[in-house]
Image: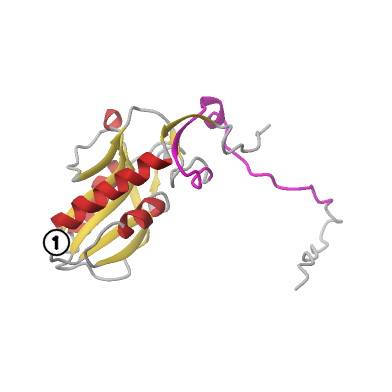
Amino acid sequence: MKVPIDLQGDVAEVLVSEDQIQAKVLELGARISADYAGRQLTLVSVLKGSLPFMADLMRSITVPVRIDLMEVSSYGGSSTESSGLVRILKDLSASIADEHVLLVEDIIDTGLTLNYLVRYLRGKSPASLRICTLLDKPARRLVEIPVDYTGFTIDDRFVVGYGLDFGEFYRNLRYVGVLRPEVYSTPPVADAGPAVEPGPPGDPVAPADTGA
């Protein structure tokens, strides 16, 4: 039987607090602003995990910034492992040719997916391409990738929060926490609400009354 999600109770410990995250974001924003002084910058985020980080980071950058989003899917691995085989589900919406690009990541572990993305983006001829990550987990690295801006280096632990998920949940935690091992031994489920008695076979299901 799957256990309902307990956002706070499923976290064994807070690894990086909300205050630590916000202080680091300001620090990274200042460094990036100094490095790109007098230039425009395109931030590229990969859906969905890095969205909170990029939203906070872009507001701490003082040079002109535009943003773009990609969505990728790894296949051939497990639910918690990346194989490095990547399918582009959503490509960039605008050209990055001759643009200064900063790829914003929530976490780097094996580096396999990121390695593919870097090669893919370089093929679009940006003026420069750098990488910024909130979390770096070097113990799991399989491909060496130069990272220009790193928030926190962490041990090989299963972390959630501030965009990081397990089974699409826990992203809304305001900190980064270590998930209890007993939680990820079985996939999480949301409370589905009361069960509905099915009608006779072949009968259409009536839509719910929304009051609209």
Q: Quadrant of the C terminus?
A: bottom right
Q: Residue at x 14, y 68 (%)?
A: 98
In this rendering, the answer to whether 40 lies above or below 45 is below
Q: Quadrant of the N terminus?
A: top right
User: Residue lying furthest right in this view?
Assistant: 200
Q: Residue at x 79, y 47 (%)?
A: 195
- Identify the residue under disc 1: 37
Is 180 inside the magenta-drawn segment? Answer: yes
Place of residue 103 in the rendered image (x, y in percent of width and height, measured from the top left): 26, 54
Q: Residue at x 19, y 41 (%)?
A: 145
Residue 65, quarter of the rendered image: bottom left
Place of residue 194 in the rendered image (x, y in percent of width and height, measured from the top left): 78, 47
> Residue flagged by tag 1: what amino acid is it?
Ala
Span colored in magenta: 169-197
Instruction: Classify residue 138 as left or right of residue 156.
Output: left
Residue 140, quarter of the rendered image: top left
Rate crowding at label 1 as few (under 14), some (14 to 19) or many (20 or more) other CA atoms within 10 Å.
few
